[in-house]
Image: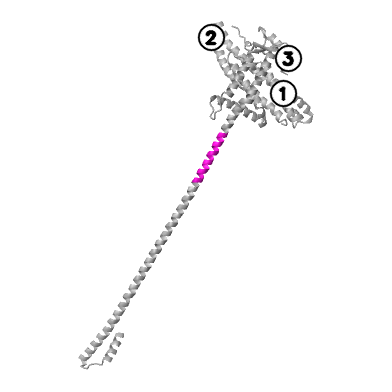
Amino acid sequence: MAESHGGAKGPAAGAHTGAEGGHGGGFPPFESSTYASQLVSLAIFFVVLYVIVSKLALPKVGGAIEARQNKIEGDLAEAQKLRDQSDAALKAYESELASARSRAQAIGNESRDKANAQAEAERKALEEQLAAKLAGAEKTIASTRTAAMSNVRGIAADAAGQIVQQLTGVVPDAASVNAAVDASLKG
Amino acid sequence: MKIDPIHQFNIEPLFTIGHIGHQTIAFTNSSLYMLIAVAIISLLMLASGAQLVPGRLQSVAEISYEFVASTIRSTAGAEGMKFFPLIFSLFMFICVSNLIGIIPYTFTISSHLIVTAALALLVFFTVLIYGVAKNGLKFFSIFVPHGVPGYILPLVMFIEILSFFLRPVSHSVRLFANMLAGHIALKVFAGFVAMLGFSLGALGWVGGVLPLALTVALYALEILVAFLQAYVFAILTCIYLNDAIHPGH
């Protein structure tokens, strides 16, 4: 195919040579006698290059690039996995912390309530004790006063009898004196 | 001192391999540089190790791989990766041989139209054969663009068919002409420096500063062109292959 191409260029090469002049061999790119040699060596070396490139060079370089790509992707995936793990750990830690905090609050509340209840109970007991003592004291006071009042009545009756005896010289009848004293105590 | 910018393109047989018909098949300087290019590519791709953390050489190999792979994916889609070895071989072969060719006193393989034409025809027939094998007659629908009014369709089809068959021409001549013209320009400007120096003496050496500066600038440009033409060749290959893979564009 290229042979015919070269042949077509033949006349052009001749014309060129004439125009150039002065050069022994004419214009080298259009010297058709060299075409066969060039085509044969081009065919050989280009085929060799193609075989080397397609069988060895491209698989090797492509493989290296792909291996690097895979490595990078693998590393990124690994990093992502580790990050997810650390995120999960952080979340677990936070929830643990929150539950511990709420537990601590619950314990605090409970112990405060207990302490309050205990204090309340003690206060109540004390109050009851005091109330009982107070009641006892009031009873004593009342009995004492009754006793005192009855003494006062006796003393008043005696005194009234004496006074009447002194003034009249008559010993009054005890019953009437008592009645009079009662009446006056009431009034 | 005579400037001979064409001499660098001479094909010199080093030894004879054999004969095909009356044609003598020789191992030429061009063959030697093809061998060097293939050796450099193989060394770069195979001897650069396959470490997890790449070294410098391995980085170059991997950047080349990724560069060509992304070019194919963006122009011909994921299906184009079938042709990854072919496009990678073309790109690396042209790029490396162009870059070797910039070194003074070396030979540039792609400054010969026969070489670039052979590569372009390889791409052309790959597209044609794969396109027909994969899509059958539907492949030829690339000549019938959608939404063209019926009365100018024949004209458009004629242009499409013509441009399809002219593809290998533009594909090969672009690379060949770029390399050829760049090397001739470099040689001419560099030759001016020496010519001025030898013919005008001290004044000439001073006057040679300008062409020298131009040579340096051209040299930088040629390094860019060497890479760029390899890239253009590869991306056009992808675009042509895209026609074969997805003919209903």
| Residue beneath disc 3 | A7
In this view, the residue in front, A164 or B228, is B228
Q: Are marks 3 and 1 in contact (CB under 8 Å)?
A: no
Q: Are marks 2 and 3 in contact (CB under 8 Å)?
A: no
Which corner quadrant holds the N terminus of chain B?
top right
In this figure, what is the number of numbered marks? 3
Which mark is on residue B205?
2
The answer for how far apart the CA atoms under marks 3 and 1 are is: 19 Å
Q: Is residue A120 left or right of residue B163?
A: left
Q: Residue at x 58, y 22 (%)?
A: B44
Q: Is residue B117 above or below residue A138?
A: above
Q: Amino acid at mark 3?
A: Gly
Q: Residue at x 58, y 10 (%)?
A: B192
| Residue beneath disc 1 | B125
Observer able to see residue B144: no
Element class at badge 3: helix
Q: Amino acid at mark 2?
A: Trp
Q: Nearer the viewer, mark 2 or mark 1?
A: 1
Query: Callout 1 environment at 10 Å: few (<14), some (14 to 19), or many (20+)?
Result: few
Question: Please, which chain is the residue tagged with disc 3 on?
Answer: A
Query: Callout 2 environment at 10 Å: few (<14), some (14 to 19), or many (20+)?
Result: some
**Could you confirm whether marks 2 and 3 are on the same chain?**
no
Element class at badge 1: helix
Query: Picture coordinates of residue B247 (x, y %)?
Result: 72, 30
Q: Is residue A116 left or right of residue B66?
A: left
Question: Please, which chain is the residue tagged with disc 2 on?
Answer: B
Which of the 4 image quarters holds residue B241? top right
Query: Picture coordinates of residue B246 (x, y %)?
Result: 71, 31
The answer for how far apart the CA atoms under marks 2 and 3 are is: 46 Å
Observer able to see residue A142: yes
* Region in magenta: A70-89
